[in-house]
Amino acid sequence: MELKQLIAEAWGNRELLKDTKYADAVRSAIGAIDKGNLRVAENTPNGWQVNEWVKQAILMYFGIQQMQTWDLAPFEFYDKMLLKKNYKELGVRAVPHAVARYGAFIAKNVVLMPSYVNIGAYVDEETMVDTWATVGSCAQIGKGVHLSGGVGIGGVLEPLQASPVIIEDGCFIGSRCIVVEGVIVEKEAVLGANVVLTQSTKIIDVSGNEPKEYKGRVPARSVVIPGTYVKKFPAGDYGVSCALIIGQRKASTDLKTSLNDALRDFNVSA
């Protein structure tokens, strides 16, 4: 509570960051996030709760960090943020050129292919972050998730009031999917390749006799593919992107690690 209070005071008056006590409080918060002891968002009995003061600490950390140069011949980098280290001790497999910033939590048995994990993110145990996938700032990724090649999980430090993207336990996120603007993909859902989800994206369940529409949330165990619907514009009628829920993930796919296998249960390729 003392740490939270100090962060709140500094957020209200940035001049306080010149005081070592407040700057150290910010650094302590980032250290706790890095170790997984503090999270931007937590799953509570009443749903996901966002800790705004934690995001405030991350933003102020940018302000107190000094720019510095790293040389890794023949490359040179110039930035404020340190990178995570000691992957062996953390029990994380990091394949070159996997990059995770200090202040991102990476749990044991996570596999990082050449990918990027930004500050404030939380990546839980036994998750695969596949080649060229990006986990944006403050995104929350659950246990046993597969983020396939080229997946883009959006970050959320600006605007500050926005909620982070949340991918719950056991989800399969197909190649080149984009999930942004605080969308929640609930437990064990499957997104086929190229699904794009924003807060305004229509997510339409077409598995029953009548369509059922969602926004900002993919229900648990849903199998989702890209789709379109017709929308009227002054210039005419045009197809607009949406996401289609074509069914529920079957028990037979629970032991499968292949996204394609899960989708073939519904005669859909990815």
Image (cartoon, grey):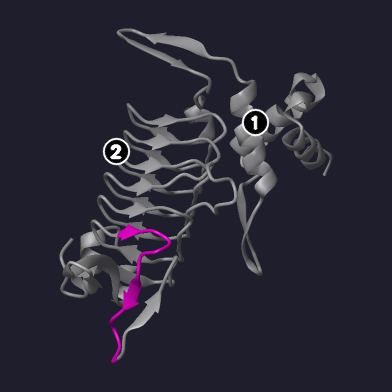
* Quadrant occupied by the N terminus: top right
Kindly state the secondary structure of the residue where label 2 is placed.
loop
Which x, y percent locates residue 37? 67, 42
Would you name the residue on which mark 2 appears?
132
Which SS does the magenta portion mostly show?
loop
Q: Is residue 59 above or below residue 229?
A: above
Which x, y percent locates residue 15? 76, 24
Per the rendered image, the range of residues in magenta is: 196-209
Residue 37 seen by the camera: no
The question of residue 199 being in magenta is answered with yes
Q: Is residue 28 above or below residue 168?
A: above
For the point 55% across and 52% down, the residue is: 162
In this rendered view, identify the residue nearer to me: 204 or 104: 204
Q: Are marks 1 and 2 in contact (CB under 8 Å)?
A: no
Residue 241 seen by the camera: yes
For the point 26% across and 50% down, the residue is: 176
Check the image and name the residue furthest to the front. Answer: 234
For the point 40% across and 54% down, the residue is: 145
The question of residue 201 being in magenta is answered with yes
Which x, y percent locates residue 219? 43, 72
Residue type at tag 2: Trp
Would you name the residue on which mark 1 appears?
60
> Mark 1 or mark 2: which comes first in sequence?
1
Relative to 250, 2 lies left or right: right
